[in-house]
Image (spheres, rainbow, N blue to C red):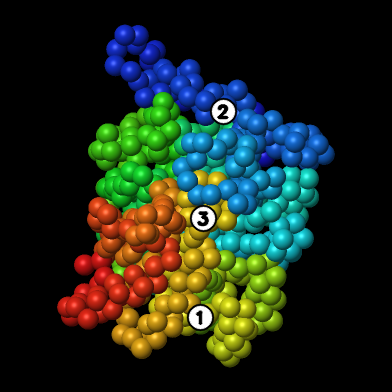
């Protein structure tokens, strides 16, 4: 990460003044709309959000929660990975009648960015110890390879940063309208089937541009995926920019460039620019895409501010032309599309190209504890490994394990509840943070997902062997789709639903048949197709039994 600097946000100098009396602009800086058009834009203009770190260290950590300026609390804190968590006992609803301050607990969620999902065992142990000491032993592995802590007090934040940074970990830009964690293949550099190792590109971007104030006021969040794995193990279809490993027939291994993916309430799959980029140019092209977003992205309405809306309006051809002509100053090489993969998670025991093995284990919907992370670090070190990885399926990997040590490690991790050979349900159920901690949530998700896994293991024990392609079930606490509602076989969007006796209770709108890779597409939202949280086990059981009974030869759920 670069140390925060005072570089002003700039565009490439091609702005034209806003034209009065013409069609209302979308707030694009490059077209001259520099006056903030909503309170979020005003807050970012008033003070670069990265500046809040100094106030946390010098004022808020000493004055406590009540000393925090509300504009920092509910805005700028995010740029340092901090959100207030939801006060316990507030019912789930789109909270028009509840004041924001009533929703706030006096504690924070803290997101630690793990670029590329890459950690040493020392780093993992430090994260675990921080969770034990400062976060009531909570730790969730998110589906963006981060680790998220809860119950953090502002008084402890500077000490936590000091401990994290002493081992090279950061919370810089883990949230906020800025370049968030850089997703990377968890098996970069070790997988036998790898097309190209993207690690140098991730490292260069992280070191040069994360914490750079010229990129810290974007229209909204900016998500990146860079992977040279043929498994597309960074969900490239749904990131703002994705560099996807591909072999060019003349130039060799490099990356195919995709832009404009994203879910939430207006989902879009990323589109290919048709351009091939070598490893040495990956960071430069990434920067160009971020700068386009900063300069041309829509800032007027928050719900139209993601890059996907600009890409949708411009199309791939214009986007590439602007990237080449205005930001790179040269043409990119045309390139082929990568082959679409079927499998993408890394669960189980797999051989590395150096003859060692990596072991992929499944958490329960991302929920672990600090103590578990410390024990994982110890278990890995006992077999001589110093490298662990997080994945976008909320899994953990231990790398560099000798063949003779694999069984012992698998046993040790299993005792921690982390299974290398999980049931299809444990393997394929994911959940977002939900109402336990998230202020936007309408329903409970994490514990519901854990209960669902246990229910399905019992209910469907008789047909477990028939499930060759696990049916993915993604639980989300609201329409924001942090756990990827629309691209699951069974996508669940939290909302209040009728229970048949005239009550509104926690439940889900169901999206059926979404997928990524070979099945890329959004699940169908069938009007009125809703299930209460209490009936979820019955519902999934019925659906899975029917699918297994009626499927054709080789037919997957999404088909
Ligand atoms: Fe919170 Fe909604 Fe995202 Fe779940 S999907 S973490 S409830 S914002």
Q: Nearer the viewer, residue 551 or 229?
A: 551
Place of residue 117 in the rendered image (x, y in percent of width and height, measured from the top left): 54, 61
The residue carrying mark 3 has its beta carbon less than 8 Å from ligand 1: yes
Decide if residue 449 is on the left or right side of residue 314: right
From the image, which quarter does the N terminus lie in? Answer: top right
How many other residues sit within 10 Å of disc 3, few (<14), some (14-19) or many (≥20)? many
Give the image quarter of residue 491. Answer: bottom left
The residue carrying mark 2 has its beta carbon less than 8 Å from ligand 1: no
Per the image, the residue denoted by label 2 is 44
Point 48% across, 67% down: residue: 449
Per the image, the residue denoted by label 3 is 434
- The local secondary structure at tag 1 comes to loop
Task: Specify which label sits upstream in the sequence, 2 or 3.
Answer: 2
Disc 2 from disc 3: Cα separation: 27 Å
Q: Residue furthest top?
A: 21
Per the image, the residue denoted by label 1 is 420
Q: Residue furthest left?
A: 552
How many other residues sit within 10 Å of disc 1, few (<14), some (14-19) or many (≥20)? many
């Amino acid at each position: 990460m670069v140390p925060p600097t005072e570089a002003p946000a700039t565009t490439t100098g091609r702005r034209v003044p806003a034209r009065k009396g013409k069609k209302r602009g979308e707030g694009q800086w490059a077209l001259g709309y520099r006056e903030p058009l909503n309170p979020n834009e005003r807050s970012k203009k008033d003070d670069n959000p990265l500046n809040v770190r100094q106030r946390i260290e010098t004022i808020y950590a000493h004055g406590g929660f009540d000393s925090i300026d509300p504009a920092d609390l509910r805005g700028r804190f995010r740029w340092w990975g901090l959100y207030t968590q939801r006060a316990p006992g507030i019912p789930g609803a789109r909270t028009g009648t509840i004041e924001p301050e009533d929703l706030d607990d006096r504690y924070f969620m803290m997101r630690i960015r793990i670029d590329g999902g890459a950690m040493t065992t020392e780093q993992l142990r430090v994260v675990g110890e921080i969770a034990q000491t400062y976060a009531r032993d909570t730790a969730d592995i998110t589906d963006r390879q981060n680790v998220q802590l809860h119950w953090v007090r502002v008084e402890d934040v500077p000490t936590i940063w000091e401990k994290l940074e002493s081992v090279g970990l950061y919370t810089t830009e883990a949230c906020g309208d800025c370049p968030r964690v850089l997703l990377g293949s968890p098996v970069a550099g070790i997988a036998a089937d790898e097309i190209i190792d993207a690690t140098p590109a991730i490292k260069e971007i992280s070191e040069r541009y994360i914490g750079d104030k010229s990129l810290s006021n974007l229209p909204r969040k900016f998500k990146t995926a860079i992977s040279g794995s043929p498994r597309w193990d960074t969900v490239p279809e749904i990131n703002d920019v994705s560099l996807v490993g591909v072999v060019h027939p003349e130039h060799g291994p490099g990356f195919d460039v995709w832009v404009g993916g994203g879910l939430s309430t207006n989902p879009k799959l990323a589109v290919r620019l048709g351009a091939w980029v070598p490893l040495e140019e990956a960071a430069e092209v990434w920067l160009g895409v971020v700068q386009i977003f900063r300069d041309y992205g829509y800032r007027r309405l928050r719900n139209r501010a993601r890059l996907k809306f600009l890409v949708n309006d411009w199309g791939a051809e214009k986007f590439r032309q602007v990237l080449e002509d205005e930001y790179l100053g040269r043409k990119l090489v045309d390139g082929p599309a990568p082959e679409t993969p079927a499998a993408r998670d890394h669960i189980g025991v797999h051989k590395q190209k150096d003859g060692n093995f990596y072991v992929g284990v499944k958490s329960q919907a991302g929920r672990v504890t600090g103590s578990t992370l410390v024990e994982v670090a110890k278990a890995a070190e006992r077999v001589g490994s110093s490298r662990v990885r997080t994945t976008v399926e909320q899994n953990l990997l231990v790398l560099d394990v000798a063949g003779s040590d694999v069984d012992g490690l698998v046993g040790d991790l299993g005792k921690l509840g982390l299974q290398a050979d999980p049931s299809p349900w444990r393997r394929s159920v994911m959940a977002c943070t939900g109402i336990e901690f998230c202020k936007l949530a309408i329903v409970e998700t994490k514990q519901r997902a854990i209960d669902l896994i246990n229910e399905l293991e019992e209910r469907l024990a008789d047909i477990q062997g028939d499930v060759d392609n696990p049916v993915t079930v993604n639980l989300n606490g609201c329409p924001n789709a942090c756990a990827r509602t629309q691209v699951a076989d069974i996508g669940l969007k939290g909302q209040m639903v009728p229970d048949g006796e005239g009550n509104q209770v926690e439940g889900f709108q169901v999206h059926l048949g979404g997928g990524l890779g070979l099945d890329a597409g959004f699940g169908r939202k069938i009007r009125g197709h809703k299930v209460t949280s209490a009936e979820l086990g019955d519902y999934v059981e019925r659906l899975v039994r029917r699918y297994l009974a009626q499927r054709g030869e080789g037919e997957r759920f999404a088909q």
